[in-house]
Amino acid sequence: MWSSGAIALEKVGHRAPAESSNLTVVFVSTGLGREYALAFAERGASVVVNDLGGNAKGGGKSSAAADKVVEEIRAKGGKAVANYDSVEDGEKLIQSALKEFGRIGECWLHWNIYMEGFLFVFQDLIHRIHLRGSFLVTRAAWDHMKKQKFGRIIMTTSAAGIYGNFGQSNYSAAKLGLLGLANTLAIEGSKHNIYCNTIAPVAGSRLTETVMPPDLVASLKPEYVAPLVLWLCHEQCQENGGLFEVGAGWVGKLRWERSQGQIMRQKSRPMTPEAVRDQWDKICDFTDATKPTTIQGQHALGSITVSFLSSFSPSVSHLLSFSPFLPLPPPLPQALAVGQKLPVSTFNFNHTQCILYALGVGMSTKDPDHLRFLYEGHPDFSCLPTFGVIPSQAAMMDGGLASIPGLNIDFTQVLHGEQYLEFYRPLPTSGTLTSEATIADVLDKGSGAVILLDVNTYSGGELICYNQFSVFVVGAGRFGGTRTSAKAKAPLPPPKRAPDAVVTDCTTRDQAALYRLSGDWNPLHIDPGFAAMGGFKAPILHGLCSFGFAARHVLKQFANNDPSRFKAIKVRFAKPVMPGQSLQTAMWKEGSRIHIECKVKETSDVVLSGAYVDLHQAAEASPEPPSQGGRLQSDLVFTEIGRRISEVGPELVKKVNAVFGWEITKEGKTAAQWTIDLKNGAGSLQKGPYGGKVDVTFTVADEDFMEVVQGKLNPQKAFFSGKLKVRGNIMLSQKLEVILKDYAKL
């Protein structure tokens, strides 16, 4: 039914390419298969000879062919046993070999039936034997190879599959399908020391003797092919994913070649057939051709993708950046990228985004301490410090990395390795933030490249926070760069003693679905199918979500939930978390630094390592003295209020009977403080903080204050929109109209 096939089992003590000790191999019994069986047996291998004994058309069945080869091997002192199962019963074939000789070591697959003259007729038998049979036998052997951390697989294609041949559409399709299967197995098996290569042999056999002259068949003996197979099966051979033509004593390696091509798509201009026609000579010009070896090497497609990204909305471009069907080329030398700046990004937000983020990292109204981060009307309403990654992340997520010359990467191979966040001012709860990102360095880690992305985030012209994203690109290393950088914020191990505090918090099944609403739309965290492509059984939790959980544990345990005391945080993302698992944060206090290690409670897997949080001392956290200088529009209003109090203060005291504190902000920070005392004596206006008890305090931006005073902004609407914050006796805010409208005439 087929001319030759082989499965090599049980890797034991290879000594040299010409020697093999206790290697178990499965071959069919005629042509190339017979030659391989005899060659391996001669070098000490134990051989399973597999053949149904069919004819070249796939018909008939006999055990004689396999038995004959077994007898030949045994007559020479070798070890062999016959097997008569079809390759479509791959599991039986593998189990037969295991039962007789032991463990899986190598797998050589070559099944042939030949049918000529069937253009456009796909014979099911051909595909069942060549393609499906090879898949089934490999699948049966795969787990055994993985367990023993060794395997060698050889697929057999043909020139008809590589180049095509008249009248062989069905055969050619099946044979080239084997090459695609082999290439993927080479990628998936490499980390398990399983290598897969493909050969396209030209040898005389019962399939070729009817179509080749006798003298040519004689020159293409199978023994001129077998040595290549023996070497590729040897444990010293490190070839993986190769394609070789072999015959008549000659061996050559094939590779793909691609012209430089032409980018036909331009922004705001349609791509037309006429443009393709006019550039056809350049498209087909192989001068300075490239030789791609991996899917990441698709430079042309990557360039087109990059040009497309600028035309799509941020959410669509982000999804494209994670699509496994739009690969980008690997990084070029670091010198081309280091120092390059990403496009400036703008982030507009209000209290809604702050609250949504707090919910996304596990905060709940069940804990009264969380209310200051969940309710915009809370007297101390604040933004969680780790929200600082959100505006800065936008610089990277919206396709910014794809715009850097010399930094063309495959986003399907990007992992978030580490994160550092440092504050210079507490985050505002609303406003517009701008982020400026720079490629700080590109490191060569061998198995991949690490991109250090520094992002400074500003409110107006003031620096609010700094982020360093450490991004690992799998398979993009070995470009000759340095392994380390002085610019990297290094992780630190925790002290070797029991932790000072441990906090356990449960994530929910919907944690990732909730967190992604803060702007990380990667489908890896929501789409089961996409997660499966990444090798996960289900969508995983965002690393930055676990980051937020751990940070707020420290904030509550050691800083009384005061975000102004939060200075910096550094983490390394070690393992993924599944939504619904519990996060356990261990904390060690060393001065103002809190070392942390976060685990999944159910598995004890460390998910955040080398992590720490730096806190300001309580004294350092006190707000800066408010600016007492002018240049605030509200100064004019308070000056007028002071004048009117001096005229009719006693009357106002009778009507109001309260002390009001005012905090006027500018660009997110306190710019001035005022106290209106309409409770004591004849009333007074004082600039600066009040020495006694204030009944109610209002916090409002200078420009919003003026909108209220001028009647352009209703105070109630200002309050519900988060522009006006109130602490203390909120009911006294109803007397705002008395103070501002009747007595603050400009």
Image (cartoon, rainbow, N blue to C red):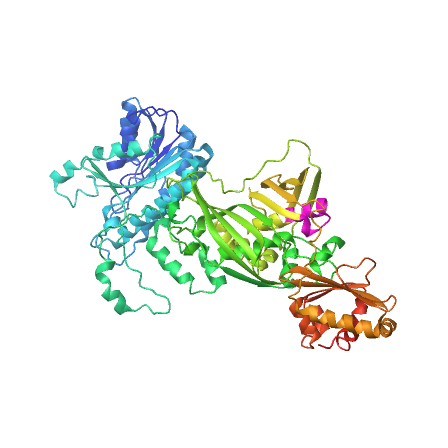
Res 151 quadrant in image = top left
Q: Would you say the magenta stretch is mainly helix, strand or loop? A: helix
Q: Residue at x 19, y 43 (%)?
A: 208
User: Is residue 279 shown above or below 190?
Assistant: below
User: Is residue 47 shown above or below 213?
Assistant: above
Front residue of 107 and 526: 526
Highlighted magenta segment, given as a residue range:
549-565
Q: Position of residue 150 (x, y in %)?
A: 41, 33
Front residue of 623 and 120: 623
Front residue of 235 and 24: 235
Res 255 quadrant in image = top left
Q: Can residue 238 be found in the magenta stretch?
A: no
Res 230 quadrant in image = top left
Q: Position of residue 526 (x, y in %)?
A: 55, 56
Q: Quadrant of the C terminus?
A: bottom right
Q: Position of residue 627 (x, y in %)?
A: 68, 59
Task: Please identify the residue farthest to the top as the structure is shown.
Answer: 77
User: Is residue 485 shown above or below 21?
Assistant: below
Q: Can residue 551 be found in the magenta stretch?
A: yes
Q: Residue at x 40, y 56 (%)?
A: 326
User: Is residue 430 shown above or below 464?
Assistant: below
Q: Quadrant of the N terminus?
A: top left
Residue 535 visible, this angle: no
Residue 71 visible, this angle: yes
Q: How many marks?
A: 0
Q: Residue at x 52, y 48 (%)?
A: 469
